[in-house]
Amino acid sequence: MSDASTGAANPHLAQYAAKGLKGRILSGVQPTGNLHLGNYLGAIRNFARLQGDYECLYCVVDLHAITQPQDPKQLAAQTREIAAAFLAAGVDGQKQIIFAQSTVPEHAQLAWIFNCVARVGWMNRMTQFKEKAGKDRENASLGLYAYPALMAADILIYKATHVPVGEDQKQHLELTRDIAIKFNNDFAAPDFFPVTEPLIFGAATRVMSLRDGTKKMSKSDASDYSRINLTDDADAIAQKIRRAKTDPLPMPETPDDAEKRPDADNLLGIYAALADREKDDIVGEFAGRQFSEFKAELTELAVAKLGPIGAEMQRLMKDPGHVDAVLRDGAQRARALAGPILDDVYKTVGFLKP
């Protein structure tokens, strides 16, 4: 993991250094259901790992979810599922803040101000809108177009100093930084908002489908055998790995050989990520061996790592009252941080106090 910021460059870090921390993190996950191995390795696993070094706020971004049609009952259930995943993965709900985005109205209030700070030209460059809207852009919701400004508000309503980012979020963090700088300049308020820094976790683990190593693992794939869900039990994990697509050759001999064989390369990458080892080391360990031997060891590793998380998620999802209590407590604590910052924003902008 690299940390691009320094205390000298970011005056907002001083208060955290005094507490022995590196800063404040905000990150969120959309409540889209069917969390899978890719979600875990790409984001949720890191949430638990960061909490020793940072003050952490983790939200279920339900406001972002409704930029596209949602079933209300399913949205509520999936919000609890994401919160359960945070807890099952090891995030301490008492020390860190876990909440649903919609329960902290300051997010939406700051987003409107940022809608007036951000420029249309900036929004037009956001590639995710183009991808999600597709050819039918005229039918896309205004929320889908404007949601990068809400994402900036999610981060800056807490003056978060750092955000964990993957490849698909780098552009939105750049927009957040641009909005912070423009707000500070427009209102002659130097350093009001921090210029939030990215946290990048080495080489990203791009988890591909177990049925097609050229396609990203996705909850929308028709085949449940294409993915390992976080709620899968040991038997389901083992069955999916046994049925994962391979080719007729033995295991790759070299990293270059692995890259030419996407199904093998995907399984090697999953093993390396779960074992917290370099993929090249895993290639060397299994070079020339039969796929059946490798799959047996991958199954044992995956069950050991993911089985307890799935079991805890299942337990928590059967106790919605506990999950809701964690979310309520998190919302209260989040609002205690966000409220004074929004008050300062309103004063800076020139709004009268009620």
Image (cartoon, rainbow, N blue to C red):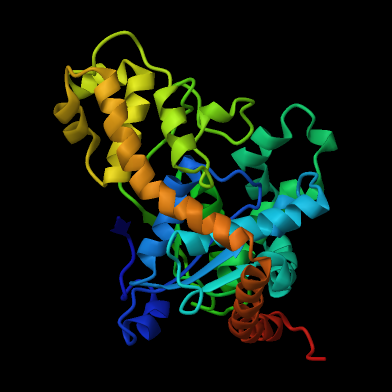
Total labels drawn:
0
Above or below for 337 versus 113: below
- The front one of 23 and 58 is 58
Q: Is residue 203 visible?
A: no
- The front one of 21 and 179 is 21
Residue 278, position in %: x, y? Answer: 22, 40
The answer to which image quadrant residue 297 occupies is: top left
- The front one of 216 and 140 is 216
Q: Where, quadrant-wise, is the N terminus in this rendering? A: bottom left
Q: Which residue is farthest front?
A: 235
Residue 337, position in %: x, y? Answer: 58, 82
The answer to which image quadrant residue 249 occupies is: top left
Residue 183, position in %: x, y? Answer: 61, 70
Residue at position x 21%, y 24% in the image: 255
Above or below for 139 versus 89: above
Q: Is residue 184 visible?
A: yes
Residue at position x 62%, y 85% in the image: 336
Q: Where, quadrant-wise, is the C terminus in this rendering? A: bottom right
Q: Which residue is farthest bottom?
A: 354
- The front one of 160 and 237 is 237
Taking the image as shown, residue 246 lies to the left or right of residue 327, namely: left
Above or below for 202 versus 263: below
Residue 346, position in %: x, y? Answer: 71, 82
Taking the image as shown, residue 31 lies to the left or right of residue 2, namely: right
Taking the image as shown, residue 3 lies to the left or right of residue 76, namely: left
Residue at position x 54%, y 78% in the image: 192
